[in-house]
Image (cartoon, rainbow, N blue to C red):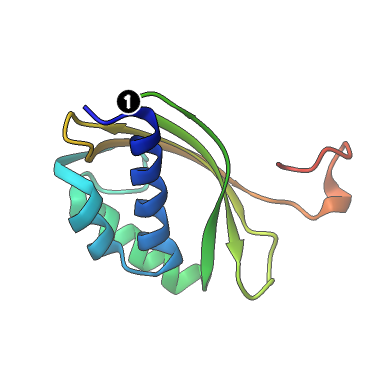
Amino acid sequence: MPTASQSVETVQKFLETAFGQGRPQDAVDAYVGDHYIQHSPQVRDGKEGFIEMATEMAKSAGTFYPETKLVVANEQYVVMLTHFVMTDGSTPGRAFVDIMRLDDNGKIVEHWDVSEGIPPAEDFAHGNGMF
């Protein structure tokens, strides 16, 4: 069983490889277990569903990188608030909360997420910002 810090590192490397480097197949090969359960309603179950989604996201959204803002973790679960920052500055990006379950070998085997676009600062009802 991995430690909580090892689980966090795995999830961060997975997101960076898949999205920041645009290499979803390599991310899956390195960090995902034999069976990957997907709960995101827009993404097909399994590894291929993730690869398809990440590839499409890169085509439609442009270039972006994941910036970790908050992590809550134990050995088996990682909950991560991430800012997907658009490298061209075209939009403020998206906020994602990902929940990932890792198996006893430290591989990602299950995923849940919620996301929303980040509105311009002037559209906030408060001065706290998104993060």
In this picture, residue 28 sits left or right of residue 73? left
Taking the spot 32% from the left edge, 48% from the top edge, the residue there is: 43
In this picture, residue 78 sits left or right of residue 102? right
Across and down, in percent, residue 66 comes to 52, 56
Taking the spot 34% from the left edge, 67% from the top edge, the residue there is: 55
In this picture, residue 123 sits left or right of residue 59? right
Q: Quick one: 31 or 96, which is closer to the camera? A: 31
Across and down, in percent, residue 83 comes to 59, 51
**Count the marks: how many?**
1
Residue denoted by label 1: 75
- Disc 1 crowd rating (10 Å Cα; few below 14, some 14-19, many 20+) is some
Image quadrant in which the N terminus is located: top left
Taking the spot 42% from the left edge, 62% from the top edge, the residue there is: 19
Tag 1: amino acid: Glu
Across and down, in percent, residue 115 comes to 54, 43
Q: Secondary structure at mark 1?
A: loop
Taking the spot 68% from the left edge, 65% from the top edge, the residue there is: 91
Image quadrant in which the C terminus is located: top right
Q: Quadrant of residue 29?
A: bottom left
Across and down, in percent, residue 9 comes to 38, 44
Q: Relative to 16, does residue 125 appear above or below in the rendering?
A: above
